[in-house]
Image: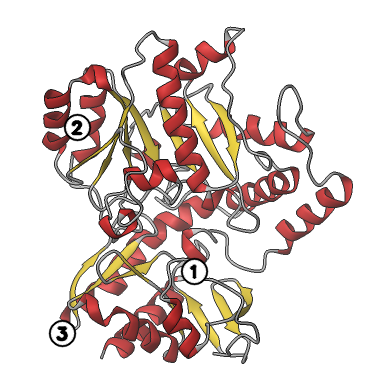
């Protein structure tokens, strides 16, 4: 661990007083499932960066694809009738992977953009349907939907919403694990006032909570029955992390009206996000004469599109969707014994390449992350002291066992 020579960087989600006192953890290199700091120390990457490095670090195939694209055309405006050839090709490819055939793809610069785009489109769609009162968007306790205004208003994590004032009044929160809570809200305020329900198939940054059995199917049906749009937040779970399928929406047959994505779209090699929009939601805007006045300067960035195409090539050619499914079992088996440690209250695993080791005392999380680094693991805590385990899909069974052993040593 080597301190930066500059004090100019303000880190996200950080106690900057503590960072300034100790110096940052500076990552200098990545290869496969490992990273190195500037002092040359090697670490197993337990989190794939921040859920995103699905194909692993150091993929020159992606870097080369980006370099070729940047030297030809880095980017051009995507507004009006303009696009680049690689962006158009990526949109068609993604439409073919979408859980809803014929879905349109709207590009953004990242996950928070994707969520806010879906919030705005949900409201605008109902306006075009002659139901302008359908404006309220609904999230869940424990949920994280990015940090733009819409995503912050949808957040079920109180610390992320505190001390900003009321950013968006037309937002509500229901229990994360009880479908009847959603139904109760609809009955109290009326379906004619609700635009959309936003749902992470797996609660991610809020602590890595797997959906209760039958929950996703039940809330999806409630939305159908009450004419409420169902928006799947697959910023974390999209592009294979759920294992076996490109999207959790496919695995759980959710047939969402929209899907918000980012992270695994490029495996984090360059920033990019996308919203998948079902044909019936897009139809009013494709009929002619109706503009959705929304977009981003870097939406559909040509260099990012090249990275995404190369990333998808790797996932397909190396069978990484199947490898993520294999990790579901490997992580479950390797991490389960950690529940015997006094420092651990629970291990949540068994659904894709995502697991959590819940600390018995959440207050020990910062010290635990430091201990993990001393044992050669780069990790982070999510929610209330849940160690996030979300490795790259290329992590082998041997490396999973090594990761579990190092975590055990650190916690002991």
In the rendered view, tell whether residue 104 sits above or below residue 57: above
Classify 10 Å Cα crowding around label 3: few (below 14), some (14-19), many (20 and above).
Answer: few
Q: Are marks 2 and 3 in contact (CB under 8 Å)?
A: no
Classify 10 Å Cα crowding around label 2: few (below 14), some (14-19), many (20 and above).
Answer: some
The residue to which callout 1 is attached is: 395
Q: Earlier in the sequence, mark 2 or mark 3?
A: 2
Q: Residue 218: which disc?
A: 2
Q: Residue at x 75, y 43 (%)?
A: 302
Q: Nearer the viewer, residue 65 or 172?
A: 172
Q: Quadrant of the N terminus?
A: bottom right
User: x and y percent of residue 402 in the render?
Assistant: 41, 82
The residue to which callout 3 is attached is: 342
Q: Residue at x 36, y 68 (%)?
A: 388
- Camera-nearest label, 1 or 3: 3
Q: Earlier in the sequence, mark 2 or mark 1?
A: 2
Q: Residue at x 61, y 76 (%)?
A: 8
Left or right: 178 in relation to 356: left
Q: CA distance from mark 1 to mark 3?
A: 27 Å
Q: Can see residue 234?
A: no
- Camera-nearest label, 2 or 1: 2
Q: Secondary structure at mark 2?
A: helix
User: x and y percent of residue 353 in the render?
Assistant: 40, 59
User: x and y percent of residue 19 in the render?
Assistant: 47, 82
Q: Residue 136: which disc?
A: none
């Amino acid at each position: 661990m080597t301190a930066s020579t500059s004090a100019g960087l303000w880190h996200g989600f950080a106690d900057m007083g503590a960072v300034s006192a100790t110096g940052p953890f500076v990552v200098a290199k990545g290869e496969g499932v490992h990273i190195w700091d500037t002092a040359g120390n090697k670490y197993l990457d337990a989190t794939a960066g921040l859920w995103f490095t699905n194909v692993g670090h150091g993929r020159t195939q992606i870097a080369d694809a980006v370099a070729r694209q940047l030297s030809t055309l880095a980017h051009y405006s995507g507004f009006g009738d303009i696009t680049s050839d690689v962006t158009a090709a990526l949109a068609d490819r993604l439409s073919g992977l979408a859980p809803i055939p014929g879905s349109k793809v709207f590009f953004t610069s990242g996950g928070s953009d994707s969520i806010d785009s879906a919030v705005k489109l949900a409201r605008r769609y109902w306006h075009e349907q002659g139901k302008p009162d359908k404006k309220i968007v609904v999230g869940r306790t424990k949920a994280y939907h990015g940090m733009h205004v819409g995503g912050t208003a949808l957040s079920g994590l109180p610390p992320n919403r505190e001390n900003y004032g009321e950013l968006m009044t037309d937002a509500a929160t229901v229990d994360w694990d009880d479908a009847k809570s959603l139904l109760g809200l609809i009955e109290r305020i009326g379906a004619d006032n609700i635009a959309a329900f936003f749902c992470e198939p797996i609660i991610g940054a809020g602590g890595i909570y797997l959906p209760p059995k039958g929950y996703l199917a039940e809330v999806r049906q409630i939305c159908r029955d009450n004419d409420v749009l169902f928006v799947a937040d697959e910023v974390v779970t999209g592009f294979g992390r759920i294992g076996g399928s490109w999207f959790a929406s496919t695995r759980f047959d959710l047939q969402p009206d929209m899907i918000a994505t980012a992270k695994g779209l490029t495996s984090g090699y360059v920033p990019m996000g996308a919203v998948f929009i079902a044909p019936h939601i897009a139809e009013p805007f494709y009929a002619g004469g109706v503009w959705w006045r929304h977009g981003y300067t870097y939406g559909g960035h040509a260099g990012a599109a090249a990275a995404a195409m190369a990333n998808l090539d790797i996932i397909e050619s190396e069978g990484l969707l199947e490898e993520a499914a294999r990790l579901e079992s490997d992580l479950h088996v390797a991490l389960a014994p950690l529940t015997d440690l006094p420092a651990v209250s629970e291990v949540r695993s068994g659904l894709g390449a995502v697991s959590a080791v819940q600390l018995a005392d959440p207050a020990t999380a910062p010290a635990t992350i430091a201990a993990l680094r001393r044992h050669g693991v780069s990790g982070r805590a999510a929610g209330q002291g849940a160690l996030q385990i979300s490795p790259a899909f290329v992590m082998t069974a041997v490396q999973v066992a090594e990761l579990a052993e190092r975590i055990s040593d650190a916690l002991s």
